[in-house]
Image (cartoon, rainbow, N blue to C red):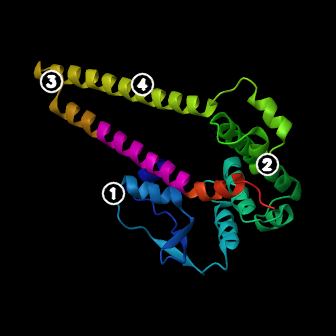
Amino acid sequence: MYLAELIEGGVIVDPIQVTAADDGKFAILDGRHRIEAHKLLDRKHIQARVMPPMKNVVEEISAAFKANIGGALPPSREDVEHTVSLLCAQGVSTREIAHLLPIPPSLARKYVNMVSSRALRARMRQAMEAVTDGDLTIPESAKKFDIDTETLRKNLGGRKKKGQLRLSEAVNVIRRQFRSFSQRNAAMFKRLFDDYEDGEVSAELVDKTLDTFKKSIKQMSVSFDGWKQRFDAAKPTQAKLRGPKKG
């Protein structure tokens, strides 16, 4: 929103950086927030600087990270962890990660351990669900997901399909929140329209309120699209990190 307001006010932002991808499209190296700001303003075009093609995915990941260092919004801890997880999924060693990003070797080890722990927890959850669903026995599931058998047995004690319960709870929370959101706004607009008909408020105020509400819904939609894109992009990486170990 802040970037959109600046651009709408005439501020010239730096071009985004992209590189040609194998599918004929462009991969974004730097500028996702500027792109979202342009979307909020309904702008169909954005200035971009096309960088030389990358040799491989690892070089592309490294270039994207470096492009954000020192920018208006430097990489956060979550950004670093996300980048490390992408590199780990490509089989890059801790030493190479420290060199590619670049970050101190001790920090690289810290993030690699965090990514590994998260992947281990994910495999444990998958292993537990395989057992509670009756698809595999405890030893079979432990072997498939590369989990210690006794640790799996311990985690299963008294727990039944926790993941499914959490999914159901999440869906119910979203439905309750949106129902409450819709009811509150319906009540507000009813009062506003009643006041307009009674001559208590101006048509300009009603128009401004409706316009603000429409823009807010649009911002929510853009935000949702961003999270959906991030999730879709993360699924292949997480599948590599969480998948059963082979060999």
Q: Quadrant of the C terminus?
A: bottom right
Say left or right for 197 vs 133. left
Q: Earlier in the sequence, mark 4 or mark 3?
A: 4
Classed neighbour count for the residue bearing mark 4: other residues with Cα under 10 Å, few (<14), some (14–19), many (≥20): few
Classed neighbour count for the residue bearing mark 3: other residues with Cα under 10 Å, few (<14), some (14–19), many (≥20): some
Q: Is residue 214 magenta?
A: yes
Q: Amino acid at mark 4?
A: Arg
Q: Is residue 84 magenta?
A: no
Which disc, if any, is residue 196?
3
The percent coordinates of residue 85 (x first, y second) are 71, 56
Q: CA distance from mark 4 to mark 1?
A: 31 Å
Q: Disc 2 vs disc 1: which is toward the camera? A: 2
Which disc, if any, is residue 176?
4
8 and 101: which is toward the camera: 101
Q: What is the magenta range?
A: 212-232
Quarter of the image where one finds residue 105: bottom right
The percent coordinates of residue 147 (x first, y second) are 80, 45
Q: Secondary structure at mark 2?
A: helix
Which disc, if any, is residue 143?
2
Report the residue marked by disc 1. 42
Q: Disc 4 vs disc 3: which is toward the camera? A: 4
Visible in this render: residue 143?
yes
Q: Earlier in the sequence, mark 2 or mark 1?
A: 1
Q: Earlier in the sequence, mark 3 or mark 1?
A: 1
Residue at (61%, 53%) from the top-left corner?
73
Q: CA distance from mark 2 to mark 3?
A: 69 Å
